[in-house]
Image: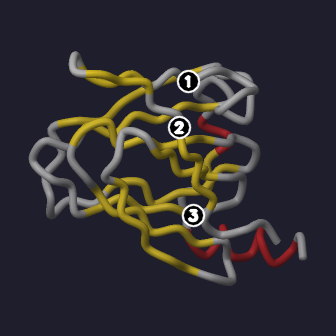
Amino acid sequence: MQQLIKWIDFSVIGDDRGSLVALEANKNIPFDIKRVYYLFGMQSDLPRGFHAHKELIQVAVCVSGSCDILMDNGKDKGVVKLNSPSQGLVIDVMQWHEMSNFSDDCVLMVIASDLYDESDYIRNYDDFLREVNANV
């Protein structure tokens, strides 16, 4: 079973003018980048996510503000706070995740290993547990 929480610390280049983080496929992002999307304008009391992916790998970066992400591999669970644009959270295959507690200024960017494919989603938690346990 994969590690529950995997962080990527990005190198920050900066001076008096500000800071810069470069994200590069197969360097500090551990896959070919096929899709990037971001969420903003979320309400703190309306969680999102509630799914896992069969094959997709993602890296979530809170480029502004903060949010919490529940990570669940079917055996272990943990909640992490994303609040730094210089750190990414790897959301691996078969990891149930739920995002919540969004700050008003939260902008959550997600870098994905493939294009959107609805058939890759597992949206029912009981189905997720069955599939995880079938592969043990």
Element at label 2? loop
Q: Nearer the viewer, residue 122 or 13?
A: 13
Q: Residues within 10 Å of mark 2 (few under 14, many from 20)?
A: some
Q: Which mark sits nearer the N-terminus, 1 or 3? A: 1
Vertical comparison of 8 with 123: above or below: above
Q: Which residue is mark 1?
A: 23
**At 52% from the left edge and 34% from the top edge, which residue is drawn?**
11
**At 39% from the left edge and 22% from the top edge, which residue is drawn?**
20
Q: Give the Cα distance between marks 3 and 2.
A: 24 Å
Q: Which mark sits nearer the N-terminus, 1 or 2? A: 2
Q: Identify the mark at residue 96; answer none if there is no mark.
A: 3
Q: Nearer the viewer, mark 1 or mark 2?
A: 2
* Amino acid at pointer 1: Leu
**At 72% from the left edge and 52% from the top edge, which residue is drawn?**
93
Q: Give the Cα distance between marks 1 and 2.
A: 8 Å
* Amino acid at pointer 2: Phe
* Amino acid at pointer 3: Trp
* Left or right placement of residue 49 versus residue 74 in this view: left
Tell me, yes or no, whether the two marked residues, 1 and 2, touch with CB atoms within 8 Å: yes
Q: Give the Cα distance between marks 1 and 3.
A: 24 Å
Extreme-top residue of the structure: 17
Vertical comparison of 1 with 122: above or below: below
Vertical comparison of 32 with 10: above or below: above
Element at label 3? strand
Q: Position of residue 85 (x, y in %)?
A: 36, 39
Q: Which residue is mark 2?
A: 10
Extreme-left residue of the structure: 104
Task: For the N terminus, give its image quadrant.
Answer: bottom right
**At 67% from the left edge and 42% from the top edge, which residue is drawn?**
57
Task: For the C terminus, give its image quadrant.
Answer: bottom right
Q: Position of residue 131 (x, y in %)?
A: 77, 68
